[in-house]
Image (cartoon, rainbow, N blue to C red):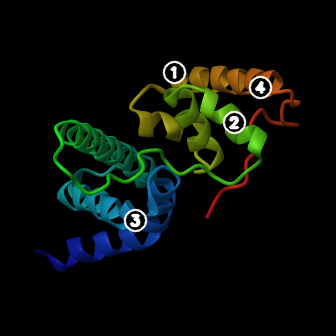
């Protein structure tokens, strides 16, 4: 391992690990966040020579895929637990599968839960992670124009969901959220 490569990775980790961890913590159980961050940076280490000039959107895209893999594993584990329970074999409890949702307003939380995963993800990438639509496009693996259209439509659906719940749409921008820790 070259010293230059190691130093580059350490700098990259030091700069972006907090943002990657925050991204993961908002979408997964706190007990698995550190392990998932480690998986993201393992992929980063393996592909260090091929990283884009702006690595954060790429890292968040990797985090998104790591989360997806983790959720699939949880679903398979829950299904196995159900099958074993139905067959009468006692098994340890499986953890909750729902992602952690920020403690913003109750109305906003309810409205966000009504949206599709795709809508929720583009909104949260721009609001919580502070990414531009172009950067969010990198995370989602789509073109920038596609991300802008998805964001516009997701904001409209969020506003409709808020109105449906009996609340006024959020002022100024269609989505104003305080980032969670």
Q: Position of residue 57 (x, y in %)?
A: 45, 47
- Residue carrying label 2: 110
Which mark, residue 31?
A: 3
Q: Position of residue 108 (x, y in %)?
A: 74, 39
Q: Earlier in the sequence, mark 2 or mark 3?
A: 3
Q: Is residue 160 above or below residue 138?
A: above
Q: Is residue 75 above or below residue 25?
A: above
Query: Distance from label 3 to label 1 (Cα)?
Result: 34 Å
Q: How many marks?
A: 4
Left or right relative to 158: residue 12: left
| Front label number (3 vs 1) | 3
- Residue carrying label 4: 159
Q: Residue at point 57% right, 23% down?
A: 150
Q: Secondary structure at mark 1?
A: helix
Query: Distance from label 4 to label 3 (Cα)?
Result: 33 Å
In the rendered structure, are the residues bearing label 2 and label 3 in contact, judged by CB atoms less than 8 Å apart? no
| Disc 4: CA contacts within 10 A as few (<14), some (14-19) or many (>=20) | many
């Amino acid at each position: 391992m070259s010293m230059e490569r190691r130093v580059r990775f350490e700098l990259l980790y030091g700069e972006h690990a907090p943002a990657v961890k925050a991204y993961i913590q908002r979408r997964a159980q706190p007990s698995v966040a550190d392990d998932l961050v480690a998986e993201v940076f393992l992929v980063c280490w393996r592909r260090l020579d091929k990283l884009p000039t702006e690595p954060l959107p790429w890292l968040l895209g990797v985090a998104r895929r790591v989360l997806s893999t983790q959720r699939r594993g949880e679903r398979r584990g829950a299904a196995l637990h159900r099958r074993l329970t139905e067959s009468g074999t006692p098994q340890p409890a499986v953890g909750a599968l729902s992602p952690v949702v920020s403690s913003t307003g109750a109305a906003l939380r309810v409205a966000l839960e009504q949206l599709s995963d795709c809508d929720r993800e583009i909104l949260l990438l721009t609001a919580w992670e502070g990414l531009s639509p172009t950067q969010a496009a990198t995370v989602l693996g789509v073109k920038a124009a596609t991300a802008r259209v998805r964001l516009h439509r997701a904001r409209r659906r969020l506003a409709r969901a808020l109105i449906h719940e009996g609340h006024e749409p959020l002022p100024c921008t269609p989505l104003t959220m305080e980032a969670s820790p």
